[in-house]
Image (spheres, rainbow, N blue to C red):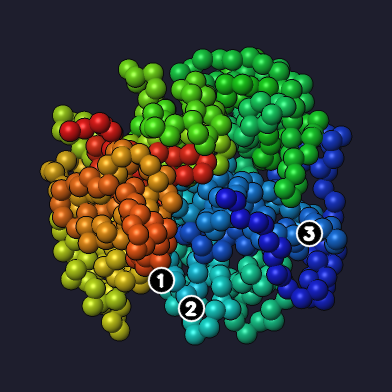
């Protein structure tokens, strides 16, 4: 269930008020109103993306920008990570969808894009970098650059951006922020940054406490030094206001009233509300339509506008079939911009209509028509996703960038009331130069040196190759190159081997030749023998058979997976049997049985756990594992 949003505990009231007054007084109103017309000087616009590893504080930093530039009213209730509007984003503490906002500072318009930090959502990152002129690279002062930092930074450097480095969380105890700066420089060199990019500006900050400083001994006031650094080092957009219109669609959004919304940057020319324009698609098709609504952005709000000029980021309604990378131009001067390249999906899984004995009992949307409509609607905004119909009308093949990418979609759908079942994730194999190739990933492990041997042994059976190893003060940093399919199910095993202390990160590397079969790493499973309700008496009697995933009073059906066997083969057990009534003891005395705690199996863990002959049944209330063939002999 969604967690209740909690109000952020921010700076004390006196400091917050003083900071807001200071920054707000240094700004002047910009023409955001619905009647704004005419050219907006390119020199007064800054378009910048915030990129970082997961949980390094970029969304919290955006919170500080919004507070200290007067976006919120004094009496407005504030929540933590206001840019993470998605419930799952708040629960997991990560950014899933790219979002844009705009703030006013010193008579300048700063468009800020908050991008995802996880490689599974790289499709979002790649698109955003195409519509900005600069980037803030946020790095945790204690952790330094992490694997996803490498991923997003490589994308920024490839596009020629010159990032501004923000060493965040300097309020953490027992850290030296200058060490993080040195590590960032080493990462720039490793990724092939040119001399100009290597001479990057950097600043120290604490997004949680709302301040930024150039030197560690400076007074900790507010985020004004960081905003000044953006104005100083982020270049103004390049474009010609009087040239023919060229706008590229970068983000897709959806409105119940206006339909699909295309968001992007105007590279040249100007666009007006009600204007007749042409959409140039990937195959060269030209679609002529009228701009039904034109928006700019202020804070978290869309503001209707009459006319917007080059350099600004806008949203338009009027094109129901617009896609990422399409160009919007004038009707009499058609010239498409270079298309945005987005990495293809690397993993796929089947989404199927639920056909278990409990089908239709907990979900609101259960038919193949409803399931297909929801998946197609996801394609409206999720550019890294692919959905393909199969020969079976009740099965759809869905491809994404990784387990987390697909897991987020599944969790979102179940919370919306959908009931369905999914198969084990599989990698997408490609034929390159006549050779069968599969995706490989760079795997980075941070663990205690005492666990190194067992972890390396586990990865050896998964076809992983050790690339680098560094041990310092009993802590080991390992880098592997491993096939993506070798990582399926590895996270839970890694946590077990390191007793929950290890840190694991990975990012897509490239397609390489198929490296052979990877043997299964899991024992057999315990399977319910009949439909009914699990009893404590039966569970206690079968505890020597393995570990259970269910509790007493759980409803089960024939073929449902209820635990893991201690042996390699699967085992059917009667989990519903009850103690017989005798003249010495009542049947209800079984409630006194003492049982081992069941193994918690969340959605992502179930996806990792199942084999090819098994499915995960997903409903708004339950997540169950089952055999594909419930009536097997």
First in sequence, mark 2 or 3: give its number: 3
Where residue 503 sits in the image (x, y, percent)?
A: 36, 66
Quick check: marks 3 and 1 in contact, CB under 8 Å? no
Residue pointed to by mark 2: 178
Residue pointed to by mark 1: 183
- For label 1, count other residues whose C-alpha is less than 10 Å away and answer few (under 14), some (14-19) or many (20+): some
Q: Is residue 245 visible?
A: no
- For label 3, count other residues whose C-alpha is less than 10 Å away and answer few (under 14), some (14-19) or many (20+): few
- Mark nearest the camera among 3 and 1 is 3
Q: Indicate left or right for 603 with 104 as reference.
A: left
Q: Indicate left or right for 526 with 241 as reference.
A: left
Quick check: marks 2 and 3 in contact, CB under 8 Å? no
Where residue 502 sits in the image (x, y, percent)?
A: 34, 69
Where residue 404 sits in the image (x, y, percent)?
A: 42, 48
- Gap in angstroms between the C-alphas marked 1 and 2: 9 Å
Residue at the outermost left position: 516
- Gap in angstroms between the C-alphas marked 3 and 1: 39 Å
Quick check: marks 1 and 2 in contact, CB under 8 Å? no
First in sequence, mark 1 or 2: give its number: 2
Quarter of the rendering containing residue 431: top left
Where residue 511 sits in the image (x, y, percent)?
A: 25, 41
Residue pointed to by mark 3: 77
* Rendered residue at 84%/35% (across/down): 34
* Rendered residue at 56%/15% (across/down): 286
Q: Could you say which is closer to the camera, residue 83 or residue 233?
A: 83
Disc marking residue 544: none
């Amino acid at each position: 269930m969604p967690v209740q949003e909690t109000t952020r505990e921010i700076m004390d009231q006196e400091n917050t008020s003083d900071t807001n007054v200071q920054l707000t007084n240094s700004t002047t109103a910009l023409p955001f109103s619905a009647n704004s017309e005419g050219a907006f000087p390119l020199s007064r616009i800054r378009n910048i993306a915030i990129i970082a590893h997961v949980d390094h504080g970029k969304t919290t930093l955006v919170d500080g920008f919004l507070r200290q530039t007067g976006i919120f009213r004094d009496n407005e209730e504030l929540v933590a990570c206001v840019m993470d509007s998605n419930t799952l984003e708040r629960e997991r503490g990560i950014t899933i969808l790219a979002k844009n906002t705009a703030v006013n500072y010193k008579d300048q318009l700063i468009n800020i894009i908050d991008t995802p930090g996880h490689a599974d959502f790289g499709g979002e990152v790649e698109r955003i970098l195409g519509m900005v002129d600069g980037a803030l690279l946020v790095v945790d002062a204690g952790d330094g650059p992490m694997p996803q930092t490498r991923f997003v930074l490589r994308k920024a450097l490839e596009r020629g951006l010159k990032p501004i480095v923000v060493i965040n969380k300097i309020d953490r105890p027992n850290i030296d922020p200058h060490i993080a700066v040195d590590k960032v420089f080493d990462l720039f060199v490793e990724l092939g940054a040119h001399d100009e990019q290597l001479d990057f500006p950097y600043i120290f900050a604490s997004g949680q406490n709302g301040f930024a400083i150039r030197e560690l001994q400076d007074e900790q006031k507010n985020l004004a030094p960081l905003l000044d650094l953006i104005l100083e080092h982020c270049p103004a957009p390049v474009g010609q206001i009087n040239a023919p219109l060229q706008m590229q669609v970068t983000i897709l959004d959806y409105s119940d009233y206006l339909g699909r919304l295309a968001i992007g940057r105007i590279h040249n020319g100007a666009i007006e509300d009600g204007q007749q324009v042409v959409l140039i698609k990937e195959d060269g098709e030209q679609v002529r339509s009228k701009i039904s609504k034109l928006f700019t952005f202020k804070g978290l709000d869309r503001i209707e506008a009459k006319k917007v000029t080059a350099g600004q980021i806008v949203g338009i309604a009027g094109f129901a079939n617009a896609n990422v990378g399409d160009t919007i131009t004038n009707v009499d001067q058609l010239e498409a911009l270079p298309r945005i390249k987005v990495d293809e999906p690397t993993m796929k899984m089947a989404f199927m209509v639920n056909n278990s004995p409990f089908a239709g009992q907990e979900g609101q949307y259960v038919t193949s028509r409803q399931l297909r409509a929801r998946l197609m609607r996801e394609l409206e905004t999720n550019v890294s996703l692919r959905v393909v119909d199969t020969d079976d009308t009740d099965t759809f093949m869905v491809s994404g960038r990784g387990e987390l990418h697909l897991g987020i979609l599944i969790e979102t759908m179940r919370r919306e009331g959908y009931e369905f079942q999914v198969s084990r994730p599989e990698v997408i194999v490609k034929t390159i130069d006549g050779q069968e190739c599969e995706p490989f990933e760079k795997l980075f492990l941070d663990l205690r040196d005492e666990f190194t041997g067992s972890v390396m042994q586990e990865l050896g059976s998964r076809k992983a190759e050790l690339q680098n190893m560094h041990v310092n003060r009993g802590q080991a940093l390992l880098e592997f190159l491993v096939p993506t399919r070798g990582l399926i199910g590895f996270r839970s095993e890694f946590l077990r081997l390191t007793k929950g202390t290890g840190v694991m990160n990975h990012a897509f590397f490239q397609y390489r030749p198929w490296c052979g079969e990877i043997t299964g790493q899991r024992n057999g499973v315990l399977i319910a023998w009949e439909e009914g309700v699990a009893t404590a008496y039966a569970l206690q009697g079968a505890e020597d058979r393995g570990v259970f995933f269910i509790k007493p009073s759980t409803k089960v059906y024939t073929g449902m997976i209820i635990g893991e066997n201690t042996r390699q083969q699967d085992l059917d057990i009667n989990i519903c049997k009850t103690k017989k009534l005798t003249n010495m003891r009542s049947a209800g005395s079984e409630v006194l049985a003492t049982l081992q705690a069941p193994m918690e199996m969340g959605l992502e863990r179930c996806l990792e756990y199942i084999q090819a002959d098994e499915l995960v049944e997903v409903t708004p209330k339950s997540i169950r594992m089952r055999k594909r063939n419930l009536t097997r002999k």
